[in-house]
Image (tube, coloured by chain):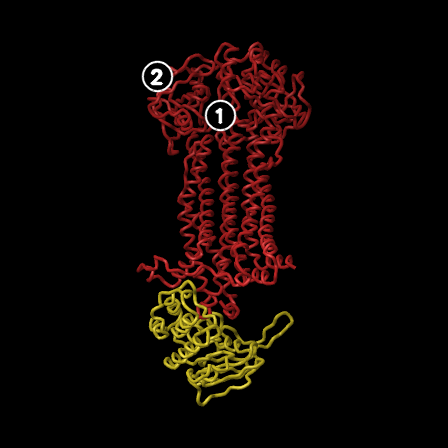
Amino acid sequence: MLFRKLIRTMGLYKAQFISMIIMIALGIGVFTGFNMEWYTLDVNVNEALEESGFADFRLVSEKGFSAEERDKIAAIDGVKRAARYLSVNTTVKDMGVDVLALTVTENIGVSGFYLMEGDKYDPESETAIWVSDKYADANNFKVGDKITLKYKDSEFEFEIRGLVKSSEYLICVPDSTQLMPDFDTYGYGFITPKALEKVFGAEFYTQINVHSDMEKADFIKAADKALGVTSMVLSKDDTVSYSEAQGEIEEGQTMGNILPVLFLAIAILTMVTTMHRLTASEKTQIGTFKALGFKDKRIVRHYTAFALFIGVMGTILGIGLGYFLGWFVMNPNGAMGTYIDMRSWTLYMPWFCWIVLVIIILFLVLIGYLSVKSMLKGTAAEALRPYSPKKMKRMRIEEKKFFKRLGFGTKWNLRDTLRHKSRTFMTLFGMVGCMVLLIGCFGMNDTLNAFVDSFYEKAINYELKINLDTENITNEHAMEIAEKYQGDWCASMSVQIGEDPYGVEIYDTPHDKVRFIDDAMETTTLGDDGAYICERIADELDLKEGSSLTFSPFGSDKSYTVTIAGVTRAMAKTVQMTRTYADKAGIDYIISTVYTDSTNIESDPMILNTQTRSAIIESFDVFMELMVTMVAMLVAAAVILGIVVLYNLGIMSYTERYREMATLKVIGFKDKKIGRLLISQNLWLTVIGVMIGIPIGYGVLDYLLTALASEYEMVLVIKPLTYLVSTALTFGVSLLVGLMIARKNKYINMVEALKCAE
Amino acid sequence: MNIVELKNVTRVYTAGDHEMKALDGVDLTLEEGRFIVVLGPSGAGKSTLLNMLGGLDSPTSGTVVVGGKDISTLSNDELAEYRAETVGFVFQSYNLIPTLTVLENVALVKEIATDPLSSHDMLRAVGLEDHMKNFPSELSGGEQQRVSIARALAKNPKILLCDEPTGALDSETGVLVLKLLLKMAREYGKTIIIVTHNQNIAKMADTVIQVKNGKIKSCTDQENPLSADEVDW
C-alpha cells in the first residue's frame, strides 16, 4: 500500500521530482563527463605511447650520430634501448604544398609505429613506406599506391605498404606555431634504414632515441660523459606530442575540478531545500501514519525512499549523460580526435568517480532521512499538526523611513525572501551559477578569439613562409632569397638555458612581414637594445626587463649573455631579438626562414619547403570551431541549470504562498498583478545574482587561464557584449520561469484554498 | 432597493461520472442595508451561494445580479474588479497575509480599490490601534478576525460576505466579533450576509434564509431582531 502512495506522491510532486532528477543528472553528468575526458585521454595516450615505443629521451645533433655513438649511449647503465632516428620534412610530388615528415628508426621498437592496415614492417625493404593513416585518408592514398617525395632537388618513389599511427606524431603538427594538425597538408611516413641508405647514399641520423627510466639530469650527465661532448637532450616533456597531450590532461583535470563542483553543489543544495519542503507539506500525512500506528522506522523508510529514488535515477541518467559528454569530446571524429591521433578511444571512468557517486546517493538519502526525522519529532498529535513556518519577526530594516515608503509588493517580496532564507539563497545560487557559467563560456570564447586574432591575424603579415636548408645554406644566400622576394627573415636555433631547451629567434624585418605581440596582445616592434623573452620564460626563469640571460646553442660550446629589453607573448617558448642586437652581442646564427608576400617561388636547392598563410590559418579555424561547440554545450547547460533551479524553487514558493495568493485574488487582485509580484521577486534576485556572478565568473576564467598558462600565453578578454549577453540570458531565464509560474495564477481555486483552517 | 437578485441559479459540480447539484434553481432577492443570515446544515449549499455572490464561483446556469450588475457572465479580470469594488470578505480562517503587518494587511486594499477608507480609521474602529505594527501571528484569533473585518470594510464595499466568521473563535470572542460586525455595518451602511450553522446568530438577523439540498427552503424577514446582548449564547 505504501508503495502505491510512494508512486502517487511522486506524481503529485512531479515538477519537483523531475527537476531534482534533472539537477542530479546534470551535476553527475558534468562531473563524470569531465573526469572521464581527462582520464580516458590519460589511459589511451599512455597506451598509444607504449604500443609504438615513444622514446623517453632524444639526443639531437644537426651533424648526425654515428653507430659508435649510439652504442655508447646504449651501453649506459639504465638505458634499455637506444636507436638512431631521423625525421626530415619532404614535399609530396603532385600534391601542392603537402609536407610529409619522412621518418626512419633503426629499431622499430623505439619511436616506431602501430600498424592499422597493410603489411607488417619489413626492415629489408628498400622501396616500402608506411604512411600515416590519417594523411592517407585525407589525401586518398591507399595501400599499394606509389608516392613520390622530394627532398631538396632529389625525388624518390616509394610504395605504400601499410597505414600506421605513431605516438611520435601523436599531435601531428610541423612546429609549435601551428595549433591543430592538418592532415590535408601535413603527415608522416616511415621507411627502413636500408631505404634511407639508398636514398641518401649514406647513413644519416640526427637523433638517438632512448628508452630509459633515468632522471633527465642523470641521463644528460651520463650521455655527455659517454659521448665526451655536451649534447642537446630532449625529454618527453620537451616534445610537442607528449607535453601537449599532458597539457590537455591537466586542462581536463582543472576543468573537471571547477564546473562539476558548481553543478553538484547546486544539485545537492536544491535537494536539501526540496526534500525539506516536500516532507513539510506531507507533515499531516506523516502524523496520520504515526497516529495509525506505523512505526517511525517504517515512515522514515517510506520517505527516504523518495530521496533514494531521486538519487538512483539521477545517477543513472547522469552516468549516461557523462558517457555521452565523454564520447562527444573523446571520439576519433570528435573534438579531441581532430587534435590527438591515437588508435584507441575506449572511454574510462576514474575509480574515484564511482566512490563519489555512491557518496552522493548516500548523502541524498541522508538528506531525506533528516528531513523526515524533523517532521516526526514529538508525539503523534504534534506530528499531526500542519507544518508551520517560522513566525514573522520585525526586522531592523523596517524601522527605517525608506522602508515605510516602499510599495506593498516590495514589502511583501522583501519579507518573503528574508523569511524563506534557504529558498532565497538557493535561487541566488542558481542565478550566480548560471551567470558564472555564461561569463566563463563567452569570456573563454572572447579570450581565444583575441588570442588567435593577435597571433595569427595581426602577427602574420606574410603570404608564404619559406623553410631553408640550414645544414647547407649560407647567410649570404639566404639574404639573397629574402631580398629577391622582398621578405623578412628569421634565424631560429635551439638553445640550452640551465638544463632546459628553449628557442632563440633572430629577426630582420624591414618589410614588416612578421610582427610581435606585446603584453596587451597588441603588435609591437623589437628594439635593438636587448633581447625579448616570452611570458612563460619570464615566469619560469624569474626574469624581467634589465635582467641578463645566458644561453648556449646545442652542439656548440659557445655561450652568449644577453640583456632583457622586454617581455612579449609568443606561441612557442622563445627568446626573440633583432638582427642588429644579435650582431652586437656576437651571436652566430644561420637564417632558417624567409617570410614573403610572393607566392611564385623559383626552385632552389636550398629551399626545403614552403607553407602558405592560409594553410596555417586554416588549422586555427578547426580549433575555433571546436571551441564554439564547447561554448554552445556549456551555455546550454547553464541555461538548463538556471531554468531547473528557478522552476523548482518557483513552484515551491508558489505552493507555499498559494493561500496568500488566493487571499489576494479574493480581495480583488487581478492575475496579472499577482503574477507581477511573483516575477519581480525573481527579477530582484536575478539582479543580485548577476552582480555577484560577474566578479566570480571573471575570477573563474582567470583561474582557468592561469592553469592553462603553461600551454598558451593568453590575456583574459571579456567583451562588453559578453557581459550584456550573459546578463540578458540570465534575466531571460528568470523571466521565462517567472512567466511559467505566474501563468498558474489563473488556476488558483480560491474556494478550495481558503476553506481549510490555518 | 434590491441589492441581490438571483434567478434560477444552478451550480453543478462534476467529479468523474458523478454530478452534484450544490445549488438547484435558486431564486432570491435581497434588500440593501440589511443584516442577512444564511442557515443550513453542512453541504446544504450555503457556502456555494456565498461564493456566487462574492464572484469566487460562477453559476452553471441562471443569473446573479449584484448592485444592478449581472456578474454571472464576467471575465476573470472583470470578476477581480467586482471583488475589489463591490464585496468584502470575512472568513472563518481570517486569511491574513502572514508577511504583512496588521496595518499593511488593511492598507493592502488601497492597491486595488478605487474609493478605499482610511486603514488607520478602520483599525481604530475595530479597536486595534495599538497593534498596527504587529504581524498577524502575534495576535489572538479574535484580534486577527477584527483585522480581517477592518480589511473587508476598508475597501468600502457595498456588501460584506462572512463565511462562519465566528467559527474558529470561543463564544465570548465570537459575540464581540459579531457585535463589531453589526456596529460597523450599520455605521457604514453596508449589507451583511453571514453564512453559519449557528442558530443563535440568526436571532439577530433582519432576514433569515434557510438552505437545504441546494434549494431555498425559506426566506423570512424578522420584525424585531435581538441584539447580541439579548441572545442567550
Furthest residue toward right = A119
Closest to the observer: B62 or A116? B62
Mark 1 — on which chain does it sit? A
Classify A448 as above or below A495: below
In the image, which lettered chain appears red?
Answer: A
In the displayed structure image, the side of residue A161 where residue A182 appears, left or right: left
SS of the residue at dot 2? helix
In the rendered image, the quadrant that contains the N terminus of chain A is: bottom right
**Circles 2 and 1: CB atoms closer than 8 Å:** no
SS of the residue at dot 1? loop
Q: Residues within 10 Å of mark 2 (few under 14, many from 20)?
A: few
User: What residue is disc 1 on?
Assistant: A600
In the displayed structure image, the side of residue A213 where residue A735 appears, left or right: left
Indicate the amino acid at tag 1.
Asn
Classify A377 as above or below B47: above
In the displayed structure image, the side of residue A346 where residue A722 appears, left or right: left
Closest to the observer: A723 or A265? A265
Comparing marks 2 and 1, which lies closer to the viewer?
2
Indicate the amino acid at tag 2.
Lys
Quadrant assignment, res A457: top left
Q: Residues within 10 Å of mark 1 (few under 14, many from 20)?
A: few
Q: Position of residue A714 (x, y in %)?
A: 43, 34
Q: Which mark is residue A293?
A: none
User: What residue is disc 2 on?
Assistant: A584
Is residue A495 shown to the viewer in this render? no
Q: Position of residue B124 (x, y in %)?
A: 34, 73
In the image, which lettered chain appears yellow?
Answer: B
Closest to the observer: A255 or A312? A312
Q: Position of residue A621 (x, y in %)?
A: 50, 36
How far separated are the C-alphas under marks 2 and 1? 35 Å
Is residue A79 shown to the viewer in this render? yes
Mark 2 — on which chain does it sit? A
